[in-house]
Image (cartoon, rainbow, N blue to C red):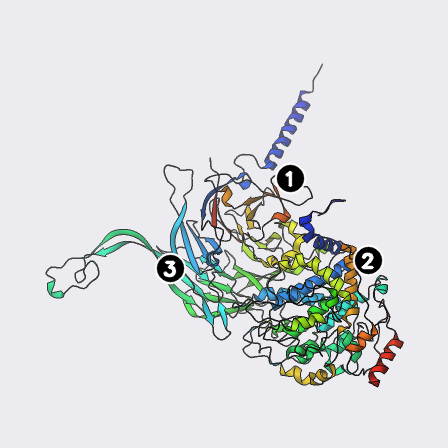
């Protein structure tokens, strides 16, 4: 009996291919992108007790360009910089821990006598400058003033002065009988932070963003109605490049919520608004960039219209991808990825906590609807991350179309313990281990997250604690 | 949220009302869509709630820091949108431009929220009125007040103080707390922002707030949280807006007693702009109407859960909503308004706006509550005697116009009768 061997082989191959595709799509193929990343707890910084001191509330988190340094700003105007320990030879697979490198008071509370208003010292944003020499530089800003800080190390000190004793007292010249050349001797490492520039008095409204240009010479600062361009060396003047203040303030209906420079094109920047629009401007076009070059806006979904449509469309954060091809925006309920070449709608939309849509009225009442969540890209732009309530944070894998919800809590804080994905139950029936929407703690919100530019290390800020999670390595 | 036949859990009661309301409104398409029947009422209810909440948010201010501009802008936009919607629904006469606000303070960098006009509130009332709900009919039993029930055109008269004479009667029904007019900032109450230009003067502070609250409250009152003020029994209530929205803030910031401005005659300084006036509240409460009180109370209970978590009571900063630096203290009225409204003060000095009682909003709310929560009590009837008591000033002006689609008709003979009585006295 002739057997159609060839056909059966074909079928067999086809079946194998299908299986392979299926397995790949699940993302469990070893070595496949970031979809198979498992996150483990690494460290937590901050006070343990539940009583949160207001000054300890973390208000911004930022890795530097190499990822070696991690800066946090808090409501008390302090900046704390953590440094990653070099990988130990004993545990080559375990990435170094972050330990405190420097702490300094960046901003102090001020009082605006003219308006009889207090100016908060809360650090709104920190942006690192790329390292050019031994010292590190960062920009930190509160509502009104931006400061350029130089963080330098000192691990040697001169000894052997002729005219000074070792403790600094001056010697009587008459007692000097010999001369010697002072030499440098090693000392304990001392990290000093000194303010090198203070950029003040340029903003009438509250600064919400600062962004360093790719030319590393200029940067922008954005408040509710205006965006100014600064030169890093010049503090006594800045250029106003965007001004949306209406002639009659009573006609004001839209404010600027975030601004960012393009990572590669030093003439391009974007700013987002409270109405859910993003405007991209080209500084070559004119000095005042009130006319946008592109405007990104997604038409409203008529099915989801409600009283709160406008409020939840307000964009709280905008971030360019590292490649410069895409940008990500965060509004109250979703994260959207935009292709810079397409203004009509985002190319990807991820729902962060859609189950809150039916709760908008309550969230409006308790002001949670105004929470400003940030978002961030991973190093190769394949995964985006943002925070949510109940100390949950969410990651969306763009390639594998997967998402995961993780929790930053002290209960999961055993070293190198793998984080278990969390789930919020939206239906009537709550499965085991799921949390119902009504049990969510809206006081525990993760607004600030940061992703190491090169590795799978993330920093997640709860109210007053900073969690560092790392990828599980075998 | 609730499956078919699923029993609502006790701890979800807080969300129950909202959930149902929201579901209804969402089902109805939310903003801009007209759901039918019951969901329309819930929609209106929710809109009113949001309106109130927005007002409270705008008027409560953190002690030292400058409030976020974005937040204020978003809340203000919300209020304006609701205003616009109400105007459309009520098919009101277009609002006249308000008197020009005081000249801009050159130092002014502040953003002035447009306090929703009273017209809006009356529009809200009117909108409710225009619901073709036969249920409302029996609720409002005659004799109806001589106050025209929220005629649509009253709003315009509110908008333009100059037209007060022509629309005196409608004005009253439009629930302008006349007592507010006596207040310094009360003048701004007359200024209705026309949709494109929100306008108003800085101290949108208390008077508008109280008026607005009292107006808005008929359907969804803010719960009375001040224990000593809120009478426990309805019998304590006399005429007046049922919605006893009296909240006395014990905060260290300036407090304001927001109360429906029912009896200007009995309580001249209804609102003390810069000083707490807890003593005012009992008086307010006393004058509150009992009828809608039932609805008010029920709604209060229903809303209490929601609003328990509400933030600070409406405390009006000296500068009102405006940037503190830029706004003149609310105690000094914007001169622009005063001159325009001096006459109105005189005219309205004695007007009692307790005719709130007939505000269809209340009944709509009651109906809504019935649907939603099984409210048993219906608002009481306000007799003509009560009305007469409250009316002190001569009733000058043409017969109030009543919009045809109002569920309850004003008995013109009643009106004439009352007018005769007034004129005669």
Mark 2 = which residue? B37
Question: Which chain is mark 2 on?
Answer: B
Label 2 environment density (alpha carbons within 10 Å; few <14, some 14–19, many ≥20): few
Q: Are marks 1 and 2 in contact (CB under 8 Å)?
A: no
Mark 1, secondary structure of its residue: loop
Q: Nearer the viewer, residue B189 or B179?
A: B179
Residue at position x 48%, y 65% from top?
A: A120
Q: Nearer the viewer, residue A372 or A384?
A: A372
Q: CA distance from mark 1 to mark 2?
A: 37 Å
Q: Is A139 situated above or below A433?
A: below
Mark 2, secondary structure of its residue: helix
Single out the residue that lies furthest toward the top: A1
Question: Which chain is mark 3 on?
Answer: A
Q: CA distance from mark 2 to mark 3?
A: 66 Å
Mark 1 = which residue? A431
Label 3 environment density (alpha carbons within 10 Å; few <14, some 14–19, many ≥20): some
Q: Is residue B322 at all visible to an observer of this figure?
A: yes
């Amino acid at each position: 009996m002739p057997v159609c061997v060839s056909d059966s082989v074909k079928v067999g191959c086809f079946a194998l291919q299908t299986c392979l595709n299926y397995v790949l799509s699940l993302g469990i193929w070893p070595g496949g992108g970031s979809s198979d990343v498992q996150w483990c707890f690494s460290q937590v910084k901050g006070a343990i007790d539940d009583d949160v001191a207001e000054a300890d509330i973390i208000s911004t988190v930022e890795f530097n360009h190499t990822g070696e340094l991690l800066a946090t700003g808090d409501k008390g105007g302090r900046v704390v910089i953590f440094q990653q320990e070099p990988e130990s030879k004993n545990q080559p697979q375990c990435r170094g821990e972050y330990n405190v490198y420097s702490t300094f008071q960046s901003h102090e509370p001020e009082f605006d006598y003219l308006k009889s208003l207090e100016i908060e010292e809360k650090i709104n944003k920190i942006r690192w400058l790329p390292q050019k020499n031994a010292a590190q530089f960062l920009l930190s800003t509160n509502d009104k003033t931006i400061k350029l800080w130089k963080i330098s190390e000192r691990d040697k000190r001169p000894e052997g002065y002729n005219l000074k004793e070792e403790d600094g007292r001056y010697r009587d010249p008459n007692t000097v009988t010999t001369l010697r050349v002072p030499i440098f001797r090693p000392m304990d490492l001392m990290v000093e932070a000194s303010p090198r520039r203070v950029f003040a008095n340029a903003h009438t409204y509250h600064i919400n963003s600062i962004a360093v240009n790719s030319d590393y010479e200029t940067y922008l600062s954005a408040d509710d109605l205006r965006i100014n361009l600064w030169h890093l060396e010049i503090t006594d003047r800045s250029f106003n490049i965007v001004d949306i203040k209406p002639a009659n303030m009573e006609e004001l209906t839209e404010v600027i919520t975030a601004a960012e420079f393009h990572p590669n094109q030093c003439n391009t920047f974007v700013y987002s608004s409270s109405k859910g629009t993003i405007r991209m401007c080209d500084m070559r076009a004119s000095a005042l960039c009130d006319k946008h070059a592109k405007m990104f806006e997604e038409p409203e979904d008529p099915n989801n219209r409600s009283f709160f449509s406008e409020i939840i469309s307000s964009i709280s954060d905008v971030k360019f991808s590292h490649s410069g091809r895409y940008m990500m925006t965060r509004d109250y309920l979703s994260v959207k990825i935009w292709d810079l070449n397409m203004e009509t709608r985002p190319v990807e939309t991820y729902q962060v906590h859609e189950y809150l849509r039916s709760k908008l009225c309550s969230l409006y009442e308790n002001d949670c609807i105004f929470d400003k969540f940030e978002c961030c890209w991973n190093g190769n732009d394949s995964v985006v991350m943002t925070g949510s309530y109940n100390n949950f944070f969410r990651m969306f894998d763009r390639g594998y179309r997967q998402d995961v919800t993780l929790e930053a809590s002290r209960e999961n804080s055993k070293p190198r313990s793998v984080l278990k994905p969390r789930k919020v139950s939206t239906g009537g029936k709550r499965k085991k281990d799921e949390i119902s929407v009504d049990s969510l703690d809206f006081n525990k919100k993760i607004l600030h997250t940061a992703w190491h530019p090169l590795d799978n290390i993330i920093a997640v800020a709860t109210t007053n604690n900073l969690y560092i999670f790392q990828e599980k390595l075998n | 949220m609730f499956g078919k036949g699923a029993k609502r859990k006790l701890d979800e009661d807080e969300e129950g009302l909202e959930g149902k309301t929201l579901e209804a409104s969402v089902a109805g398409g939310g903003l801009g869509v007209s759901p039918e029947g019951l969901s329309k009422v819930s929609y209106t209810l929710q809109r009113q709630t949001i309106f109130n909440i927005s007002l409270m948010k705008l008027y409560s201010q953190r002690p030292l820091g400058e409030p976020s501009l974005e937040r204020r802008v978003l809340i203000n936009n919300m209020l304006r949108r609701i205003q616009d919607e109400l105007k459309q629904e009520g098919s009101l006469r277009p609002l006249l431009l308000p008197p020009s606000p005081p000249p801009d303070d050159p130092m002014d960098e502040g953003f002035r929220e447009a306090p929703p006009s009273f017209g809006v509130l009356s529009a809200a009332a009117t909108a409710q009125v225009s619901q073709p709900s036969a249920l409302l009919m029996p609720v409002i039993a005659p004799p109806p007040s001589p106050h025209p029930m929220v005629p649509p055109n009253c709003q315009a008269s509110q908008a333009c103080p100059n037209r007060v004479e022509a629309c005196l009667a409608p004005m009253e029904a439009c629930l302008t707390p006349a007592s507010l007019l006596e207040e310094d900032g009360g003048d701004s109450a007359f200024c209705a922002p026309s949709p494109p230009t929100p306008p108003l003067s800085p101290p949108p502070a208390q008077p508008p707030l109280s008026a607005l609250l009292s107006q808005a409250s008929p359907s969804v009152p803010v719960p009375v949280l001040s224990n000593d003020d809120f009478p426990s029994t309805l019998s304590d209530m006399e005429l007046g807006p049922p919605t006893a929205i009296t909240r006395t803030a014990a905060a260290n910031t300036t407090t304001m007693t927001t109360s429906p401005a029912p009896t200007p005659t009995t309580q001249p300084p209804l609102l003390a702009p810069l000083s707490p006036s807890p003593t005012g509240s009992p008086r307010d409460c006393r004058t509150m109407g009992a009828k809608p009180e039932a609805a008010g109370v029920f709604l209060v209970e229903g809303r209490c859960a929601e609003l328990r978590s509400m933030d600070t009571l409406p405390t009006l900063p000296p500068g009102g909503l405006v940037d503190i630096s830029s706004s003149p203290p609310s105690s000094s009225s914007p001169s622009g308004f005063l001159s325009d409204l001096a006459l109105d003060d005189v005219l309205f000095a004695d007007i009692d706006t307790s005719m709130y009682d007939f505000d269809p909003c209340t009944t709509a709310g009651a109906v809504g509550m019935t649907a939603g929560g099984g409210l048993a009590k219906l608002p009481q009837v306000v007799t003509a005697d009560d009305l007469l008591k409250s009316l002190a000033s001569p009733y000058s002006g043409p017969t109030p116009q009543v919009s045809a689609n109002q569920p309850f008709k004003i008995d013109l003979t009643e009106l004439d009768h009352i007018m005769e009585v007034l004129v005669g006295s």
